[in-house]
């Protein structure tokens, strides 16, 4: 019902969840579902999934239940989010990475990620049309749709639109050779680079 009001990525996630996330309860009458049953489902789901994934699957479940049983009030406890520690890149490590990727497509993506508050999905969606003078406008992202195909989508909110001033060499590179990697390809290339340079894992 809401496919065309959701982002392609969210619609894809919901389609995946619909096919396999609710096996414990999918054959039940919707009128028999209550907080106890949903809590048991949460407990089982938590054994195989991260707290964030459980939260997303629960959000989809409650959205469906509220549509067909608006009077149902669930009282359930979700798993607590785990604190993740990330490696903080040192100046020395950053210098090694920048030197090793100078003049490459991956190098341009890394420089954009370094100098702009942009996600990899936004970096991969940039084109030469997003460059004007010495500024880059971020106004879209590359994500997978429910058919597992890469598509371009608009930001979820007006805050997603932003224009950023960039160094001259990055502006020239992006004008001449836009990034042709998708987010998965960019991620794999970056991980391979870190391994080849014998550097610790980092985002």
Image (cartoon, rainbow, N blue to C red):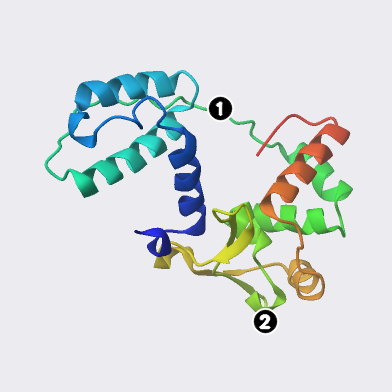
Residue at image x 75%, y 57%?
A: 181
Q: Position of residue 92 (x, y in %)?
A: 78, 38
Where, by quadrant of the figure, is residue 55 drawn?
Answer: top left
- The front one of 100 and 66 is 66
6 relative to 70 in the view: left or right: right
Residue at image x 36%, y 32%?
A: 26
- The front one of 140 and 103 is 140
Residue 133: assigned label: 2
Q: Residues within 10 Å of mark 1 (few under 14, many from 20)?
A: few
Q: Is residue 77 visible?
A: no
**Mark closer to the chain start, 2 or 1:** 1
The answer to whether residue 69 is above or below residue 108 is above
Residue at image x 43%, y 28%?
A: 51
Q: Nearer the viewer, mark 2 or mark 1?
A: 1
23 relative to 183 in the view: left or right: left
Q: Position of residue 110 (x, y in %)?
A: 73, 52
Where, by quadrant of the figure, is residue 194 drawn?
Answer: top right
Q: Regarding mark 2 in the picture, which secondary structure is present there? A: loop
| Residue bearing mark 1 | 85
- The front one of 155 and 29 is 29
> Dividing the image into 4 quarters, which one contains the C terminus?
top right
Q: Residues within 10 Å of mark 2 (few under 14, many from 20)?
A: few
Residue at image x 25%, y 41%?
A: 65
Q: Position of residue 160 (x, y in %)?
A: 47, 63
The answer to whether residue 145 is above or below residue 41 is below
Query: Contact, CB < 8 Å: mark 2 with mark 1?
Result: no
Where, by quadrant of the figure, is residue 112 drawn?
Answer: bottom right
176 relative to 148 in the view: left or right: right
> Dividing the image into 4 quarters, which one contains the N terminus?
bottom left
């Amino acid at each position: 019902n809401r496919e065309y009001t959701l982002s392609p990525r969210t619609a894809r996630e919901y389609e995946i969840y619909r096919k396999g996330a609710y096996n414990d309860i999918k054959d039940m009458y919707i009128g028999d579902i209550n907080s106890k049953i949903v809590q048991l489902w949460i407990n089982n789901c938590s054994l195989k999934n991260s707290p964030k994934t459980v939260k997303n699957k629960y959000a989809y479940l409650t959205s469906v239940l509220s549509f067909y049983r608006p009077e149902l009030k669930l009282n359930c406890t979700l798993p607590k989010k785990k604190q993740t520690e990330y490696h903080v890149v040192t100046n020395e490590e950053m210098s090694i990475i920048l030197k090793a990727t100078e003049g490459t497509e991956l190098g341009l993506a890394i420089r954009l990620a370094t100098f702009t508050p942009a996600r990899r999905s936004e970096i991969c969606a940039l084109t030469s049309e997003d460059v004007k003078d010495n500024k880059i406008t971020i106004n879209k992202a590359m994500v997978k749709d429910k058919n597992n195909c890469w598509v371009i989508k608009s930001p979820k909110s007006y805050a997603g639109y932003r224009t950023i001033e960039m160094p001259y060499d990055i502006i020239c590179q992006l004008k001449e050779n836009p990034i042709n990697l998708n987010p998965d390809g960019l991620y794999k290339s970056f991980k391979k680079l870190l391994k080849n340079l014998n550097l610790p894992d980092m985002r």
